[in-house]
Amino acid sequence: MNLNDIPVFDSDEENEMLYIPRRPKRFYERRNYFEIYTEEEFYNHFRLRKDICRHLLQQIEDDSKSATDRNNALTPTTKLLLTLRQFRLYSCKSCNYSYSSI
């Protein structure tokens, strides 16, 4: 007896009741902070100048590329800027903690 031959439900209506359509994926447009921010805003946000960021990006770009474009993979630029932003936020938190213990 093959298990695939055993009906799960008696009717097609019951089988259709199991089908729940998936919510469509939403892909948001990623901002290009090199174009959006002025030099001063960029520095305030990431704590590096644009030219230094571009130089750093050239150094790591080949190693940081995603192997696939599926699911709107992050670009090397986005990965770098996210990392710099996290470093900035973490360093600010550690400064706050060190001053609060005084």
Image (spheres, grey):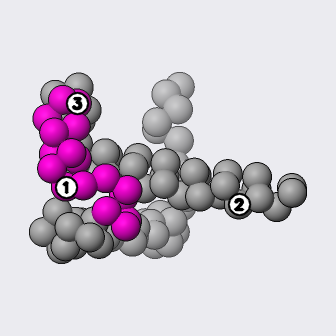
Indicate which disc residue 96 carries.
Answer: 2
Q: Quadrant of residue 101?
A: bottom right
| In-image side of 36 versus 9 (left or right) | left
Residue 43 position within the rendered picture, expressed as x and y whole percent measured from the top left: 31, 62
Residue at mark 1 to residue at mark 3: CA–CA distance: 15 Å
Badge 2 or badge 1: first in the primary sequence: 1
Residue 56 position within the rendered picture, expressed as x and y whole percent measured from the top left: 22, 37
Q: Which residue is mark 1?
A: 50
Badge 1 or badge 3: first in the primary sequence: 1
Q: Residues within 10 Å of mark 2 (few under 14, many from 20)?
A: few
Which residue lies at the image location 26% right of the left edge and 70% below the top edge? 40
Q: Secondary structure at mark 2?
A: helix
In the displayed structure, 37 sits above or below 102; it is below
Which residue lies at the image location 22% right of the left edge and 30% below the top edge? 60
Q: Main secondary structure of the magenta part?
A: helix
Amino acid type, residue under disc 2 in the picture: Asn
Residue 62 position within the rendered picture, expressed as x and y whole percent measured from the top left: 16, 28
